[in-house]
Image (cartoon, coloured by chain):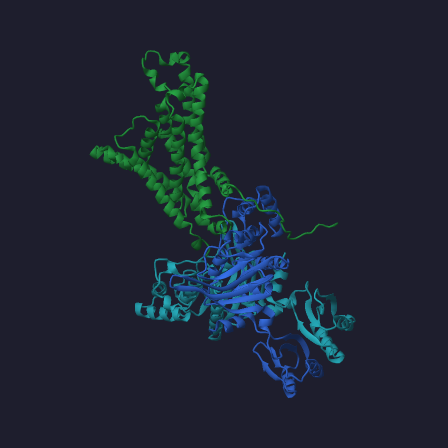
Amino acid sequence: MTAVIRTQGLSKWYGNVLGLSDVTLEIGAGITGLLGPNGAGKSTFMKLVTGQLKPSLGRVEILDRPVWNNTALFARIGFCPEQDAFYDELTGGEFVTRLLELQGFSRAEAEERAGKALRFVELAAEKDRLLRGYSRGMRQRLKIAQTIAHDPDILILDEPLNGLDPLSKRKIIRLIRDLRDAGRTILVSSHVLPEIEALTRSIVLLHHGKILAQGDVPYIRELIDKHPHKVAVTCADPRTLAAGLLGQPSVLNVQFGPEAGTVVFETRDRDAFFGRLTRLIAEGAQDVEEITSPDDNLQAVFDYLVGT
Amino acid sequence: MPIAEQGYTHWGGRFVERRVPWGPITRLGVRMAFKRKFFKLAFALSFMPAVVFAAGIYVSERLEDFQFMFKGRPGSTSFLEVNPLYFKSYFAGDFLLFMLVMMMVLGGAGLIADDLRSNSLQLYFARPIRKRDYLAGKLATAGAFVLLFTLAPGVLFILLKIVFAGSFKILTAYPWIPAAVVLDSLLLATFFSAYTLLISSLSKNRRYAAVLLFLGYLFSDLFFGIFYGIFHNPAFCLLSIKANLQQVAAALFRVPPAFDVPWLYSLLVLAAIVAASAAVLARKTRGVEVIK
Amino acid sequence: MNIELKDLRFSYGPVTALDGVDLTLGEGACGLLGPNGAGKSTLLRILLGFLRPDRGEGRVLGYDIRREPFAIRRIVGYMPEDDCLIPGLDAVTFTAYFGELSGMPRQEAMKRAHDVLFYVGLGEARYRSLETYSAGMKQRLKMAQALVHDPKLLFLDEPTSNLDPQGRIEVLELIKDISSKKDIQVLVSSHILTDIEATCSRVVILNRGKVAAEGDLEALKEVRFRLYEIKTAGGEGSFAEALAARGCRVETTEEGLLKVYLPPEMDRRAIFAEAFRRSVQIRTFVRSRTSLEDLFARTVGVD
């Protein structure tokens, strides 16, 4: 993977308050999720990557060039901040157009691009309304419009789905996927983990200003030794099923669920376990309704690594 | 049951129909006022006129004992005669009025401004209280402070005079004093609370409202001074909040007013401000806009 | 029935907000969904008695929405979406204050405030000024003030907005716990569909002022034909072919998920038999249901 965004020992303090400490990573094309509890350093990281802050220590580079004060790079980055930062006296159309002009586009081109971006987020009808009158969802869509209007290669999105209704969310998720398919680099930060999961398997987890985990979610899950994999089975006769598996060394724990008909196994050797389970069901002709892995998801990884 | 139930338990109590549903609002308003910076100072200073006037009542009855203070100044003791003018001097005193304004500025500016800023109106109106209860509670917060420094001392002065004089002469000679005390106190309380809430509801920023409150009072008097200085027409006293309050106080205590302008006009000006306040407050607390 | 609404209509001048809403809600948690502008806040305002419907009738826990709005407000707890806390107070004072305003006697309100603050997990922090609270704590305090007067109906507006992952889980747990009490009706309005799925057993979808869909979540998501989503390890290609040969329709998604449509004569046990025969492990086996998101999109009719 060729790194698009690269940091080396990146650190930032605000006075004596820690923002980020010794973050070294590489982010390539595609979608990467940025997660962490509040105060973990996510916004600091994004501000450093977009050149709004200067590192206290270390380096941050995009396409092998340092970001700080690099206006040529800024043209290729699109940033969608979490906060609302609008000039209420402008109209939606004016806002996006002016920002584009700041990017260096001519007035005519800026207007055309603004129109396209607004049409995409379905705000074309409200283009001439003052921002003061925009609802929360509309403001969020406007933020996204200004993020994509100049066609950036790299997108940094901080809670892009915040405040959107489910249909708009769908649309934006599709947009992000389309951008990924077009080869762009996208960094998405969100607290709503299921939404990150819908977008990508590749994450960076920050905690207390440091990288806690990075990479492919299933792979990270595999490495969490302390918590063996859970497998939940719903069937007509869980006890017979469990009896057939108790002899297996791969089965570490068996728990019969609160609802009748469920049983949860714990195992570290999924290969051996599932091999045996499939065989048992096939041979014993057990009628199994459902098999799931309840803690093989991002929320579980987060809880296990960060949780109290 | 050996082990008590943890987790959510129901209350099982009974709701109470308060006679004064907005009592808690006033109580909280008073508490919060005392938390503000310098409010306690203004509060303490506001006692000064009352203390001085109360002492004056004592001195007026024991003039012989205090003759040493007035040596060689004949007729100088007339100001210590406790008559309606004495009362009016207290109720319409520049210092007292100013301190009342300062208490409003320091402790009352945030009464509605803070609720607008913190967006807590939606919590209030999700409760079974009416708009007028909410406003009554807020008005009562400001009003309580004003009454403490007008009605309470007023009644106290009457009692002190009776006690020290040993007779009810004050009441027989000037029977309108008790009514005037009550009416003027209510006038001041109503006006100041309405004025304070009006300004407080105009902004989400408490400090901005405080400045507006202060400047409103100050400038009204300044403009009067300026126009009077230019045109020498006492009618301009209607511009000044302070002068209007003093005119009406004079009328209530039946002493000659400072300016030759009918006191009814002053009362109308004050009433207009109170009406404006009512209109603005009604608008700002419309339930429909409160719940988003 | 806890909420009964019949043919509710309301317009703000020329703009129609509610166009004939019929709704009955019983116990348990119900999700209220809809695009922006669908009429959710108007509905709430009518339920709390701020607006009189132009037409239509309704009862909340037996009280008429037109004639007894105060009685309704006494038994409804409202947790607003945005910030609404009064700075300068500590949590106990804040909660007890609103308890008093709901009509509780002063000492009762104080006692109950403490209980409720412990329940929502703010026990240790309840004497601290609430300006020092984190976002998650503020949400829980909002819930505390909604619960202090022991409401029968709880309306939660975007309860997990702006919360970090841990905060979200905590609030969702609280909601699940409250909804499990038999005599509190919980109405959750949220745009985060996974939260609704985690906490609610029923949903109501509003669109353009009307009820577009309503019912039990499981029933609504039920898919008539037997579609299973299967994840396997080992021998995917041949497994899919084998199943197809047995008469199933098989689709493979890009993430390696197998979607298998089972013909009516075939037993699902046969899938396992086939897997074992080919040394394939079945690692996930789930009856496919419409996702709430798809249900929403289909109901609201736009895509």
Is residue B51 positioned above or below A140 on the image?
above
Residue A109 in view in this figure: yes
Is residue C248 positioned above or below B255 on the image?
below
Residue shown at the point (59%, 42%) measured from the top left: C107
Of residues C136 and A253, the one nearer the viewer is: C136
Q: Colour of chain A?
A: cyan
Q: Position of residue A212 (x, y in %)?
A: 59, 61
Residue shown at the point (68%, 69%) measured from the top left: A232
Task: Please identify the quarter of the rendering in which residue B68 is found.
Answer: top left
Of residues B263 and C88, the one nearer the viewer is: B263
Which chain gets the blue colouring? Answer: C
Residue shown at the point (56%, 70%) measured from the top left: A201
Task: Please identify the quarter of the rendering in which residue B264 is found.
Answer: top left
Q: Position of residue A94 (x, y in %)?
A: 34, 63
Is residue A187 positioned above or below C90 on the image?
below
Q: In which quadrant is the N terminus of chain C drawn?
A: bottom right
Is residue A229 positioned above or below A132 on the image?
below
Of residues B258 and A31, the one nearer the viewer is: B258
Name of the residue lying farthest toward the left: B231
Task: Please identify the quarter of the rendering in which residue A98 is found.
Answer: bottom left
Question: In the image, C299: left or right of C248?
Answer: left
Which chain gets the green colouring? Answer: B
Q: Position of residue C55 (x, y in %)?
A: 45, 62
Question: In the image, C240: left or right of A181?
Answer: right
Q: Position of residue A14 (x, y in %)?
A: 49, 51
Residue A21 in view in this figure: no
Residue shown at the point (44%, 20%) measured from the top left: B162
